[in-house]
Image (cartoon, grey):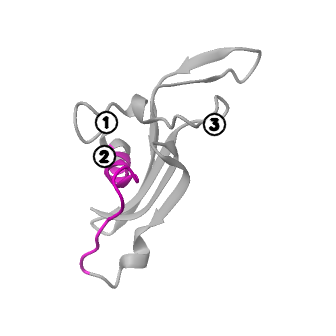
């Protein structure tokens, strides 16, 4: 499996961030680095969540990875585009989350979803 693009929306510290792994095609190895708390592990959580619907460890519940700064109109979503055996796939997942109702007032608990294209 070769990751091509990762988009995180209201996931961990990321409000709306895209990582384009194709920019690294010329490098056989790359490093994800940064200060403590900058979101390095969250990148791996996002990839694992997109593929499997869970965090990288049992104590990293995807529903708890929703950004503390997200408002109730903005869903948490992860999209991963990757290549496997010459075929490109795109996975889009959303964890369980509480959002404003689409109609009427108040909030509603939305169940986790996942779509593979």
Query: What separation in Å lies between label 2 and label 3 (alpha carbons)?
Result: 22 Å
**First in residue order: circle 2 vs circle 3:** 2
Residue 111 in view = yes
- Position of residue 21 relative to residue 42, above or below, is below
Q: Which segment did they paint magenta?
A: 28-48
Say which mark, if any, is on residue 22.
Answer: none
Q: Nearer the viewer, residue 31 or 27?
A: 31
Q: Position of residue 72 (x, y in %)?
A: 64, 28
Q: Secondary structure at mark 1?
A: loop
- Position of residue 4 relative to residue 28, above or below, is above
Query: What separation in Å lies between label 1 and label 3 (alpha carbons)?
Result: 21 Å
Q: Residue at x 42, y 54 (%)?
A: 80
Q: Secondary structure at mark 2?
A: helix
Check the image and name the residue furthest to the bottom.
Answer: 26
**First in residue order: circle 1 vs circle 3:** 1
Q: Residues within 10 Å of mark 2 (few under 14, many from 20)?
A: some
Q: Position of residue 55 (x, y in %)?
A: 30, 38
Q: Residue at x 32, y 65 (%)?
A: 32
Q: Which residue is mark 1?
A: 54
Query: What separation in Å lies between label 1 and label 2 (alpha carbons)?
Result: 6 Å
Closest to the camera, between mark 1 and mark 3, is 3
Q: Secondary structure at mark 3?
A: loop
Q: Quadrant of residue 4?
A: bottom left
Closest to the camera, between mark 2 and mark 3, is 3
Check the image and name the residue furthest to the front.
Answer: 35
Q: Residue at x 53, y 38 (%)?
A: 76
Say which mark, if any, is on residue 48.
Answer: 2
Q: Are marks 1 and 2 in contact (CB under 8 Å)?
A: yes
Q: Which residue is mark 3?
A: 74
Q: Position of residue 25 (x, y in %)?
A: 35, 80
């Amino acid at each position: 499996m070769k990751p091509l693009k990762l988009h995180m929306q209201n996931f961990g510290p990321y409000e709306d961030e895209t990582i384009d792994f194709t920019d690294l095609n010329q490098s056989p190895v790359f490093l994800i680095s940064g200060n403590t708390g900058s979101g390095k592990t969250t990148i791996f959580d996002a990839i694992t969540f997109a593929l499997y619907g869970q965090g990288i460890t049992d104590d990293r519940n995807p529903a708890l990875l929703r950004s503390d700064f997200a408002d109730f109109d903005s869903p948490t979503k992860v999209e991963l585009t990757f290549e496997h055996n010459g075929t490109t796939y795109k996975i889009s997942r959303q964890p369980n989350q509480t959002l404003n109702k689409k109609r009427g007032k108040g909030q509603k608990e939305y169940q986790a979803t996942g779509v593979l294209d």
